[in-house]
Image (spheres, rainbow, N blue to C red):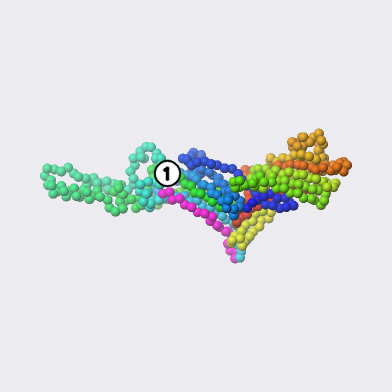
Amino acid sequence: MISRPALESEVRRGSLATTGGADAAIARPNVTDQKPVASGNGVSVYISLAEPVLFLQGFDSNDPTSHTTTMLRGSLLLRVQKQAKLKSISLNFKGKSETDWPEGIPPKRIEFRDTTYIMNHTWSFFNAQFPQAEHNYGADVVQLQKGPSSEIKEIGVTGASFDFLQRTSTPSTSSTTSSRDARKLSLQNNQSRSFGKGDSATGGPTVAQRGFKLFHPGDYIYNFELPLDSRLPESINVDLGYVKYELEALVERSGAFRANLVGTKELTLIRAPAEGSLEQTEPIAISRNWEDQLHYDIVISGKSFPLGSSVPIAFKLTPLAKVQCHRIKVFVTENIQYFTNNKKVHRLEPNRKILLFEKRADNHSTSSYPGSSMRVLAGGGVPYDYRQAAAAGDESIPHDSTNLLGNLDNDNGSIGPTEMEFSVQLPSCHFMKEKIRAEHLHFDTTYSNIQVNHWIKVSKDRH
């Protein structure tokens, strides 16, 4: 989907997106300032991401040149403070979409929520039933705590087996022992030291037979990575639906009174223009006549804008008659649609319209969000001596307070154009968290079940 701003006279789709980036290599995770996603009984689980936000490139899913991958990378850290019997350690990455249908999903209207699982991937780092569990913990890095714990033996070498080995060890033979008795004793000793089928080298049951492995105090690090296709839907959060991606860690413990540890960490996927895209630089130019009284040229310097940035808009207003323009307003409208049952069921939310910027002839310009500005480059009823200040954005200079085009009655038939430039500020994600929901904007989406689009509209009060 190629998105672009639009004017009232020619509606074109506009795109709003967040930006940012990270390019960090996976290393030993630093969890000093992090809270564990799960903890209990001396075991803590941390999920550390190399990039907490991932970017999906391209707005057109049908364009093969924009199909790329982004890499999900990170580490699961298992911090053991006292010995723990663990059955398995795994990490699951899942993407899920939900849309709510308060009136019920047609035709039966007995279901009120549509849930779609976008993807599911599991890393099984350790499992006591795996053969390799007998010899290692499945971790990329194991750093045990120094101290007495390093001398603790593996559970399974019981006292009975120790006593058995003591009893069957070869005693000191006396001078009265016959060679026949010595051979018999030696055979019994060799048989007692052999291992039965399924026994471990210590003489006890294997890890698989016990169903757990003893993890000693220390840190166990499990690295993971997964390529994500750029055609995946981005993270979405609107009133009646969402797309969410989560990493869920599961540590299964052994013992009747040892609860499993389960914890989640959310991951954000953001849509960004593809490499080489001109969406943020290619301008939109509109040239129109209004009732043969006013010719206007409007240029918007871009087709997609990140949330938190500003939208540059240039105006050239040429009177064709004695016309008055009292104010210019710049709005953004947001349209949200929901789909289900292969797009057979559709819900369209009422359009939301938010005033971003207003320039009045009788007052200073006003902005809904801090950061907007404007300047007059030519005309506009600004006296010649003040044109340089007007071009710098000074609105306190003398100017015509009834008409943005100036006093056309004093031009003696010589009517010239008025040129202005607006820099219209869009709300940032941080700013919207502090505002009421009615003023929130959600970035454009490419997901088929939840579609969000925006339009820039410019209106002029004239007579």
Query: How many residues crowd mark 1 within 10 Å: few (<14), some (14–19), many (20+)?
Result: few
Horizontal side, residue 134 vs residue 329: left or right: left
Residue 108 percent coordinates (x, y)? 59, 65
Res 413 → quadrant: top right
Residue corresponding to mark 1: 140
Residue lying at 12% horizontally and 43% vertically, measured from the top left: 175
319 in the magenta segment: no
Front-most of residues 128 and 11? 11
Above or below, comparing residue 348 to residue 408 in the picture: below
For badge 1, the amino acid type reads: Asp
Camera sees residue 354 = no
Horizontal side, residue 192 vs residue 239: left or right: left
Front-most of residues 23 and 339? 23
Residue 38 percent coordinates (x, y)? 48, 46
Front-most of residues 324 and 241? 324
Res 144 → quadrant: top left
Dot 1: element: loop
Above or below, comparing residue 340 to residue 148 in the picture: below
Residue 447 percent coordinates (x, y)? 59, 54
Residue lying at 70% horizontally and 42% vertically, measured from the top left: 423
Residue 298 percent coordinates (x, y)? 74, 46
Write the start and end of the magenta stretch as one range.
108-126
Residue lying at 72% horizontally and 50% vertically, measured from the top left: 7
Query: Magenta: predominant secondary structure element?
Result: strand
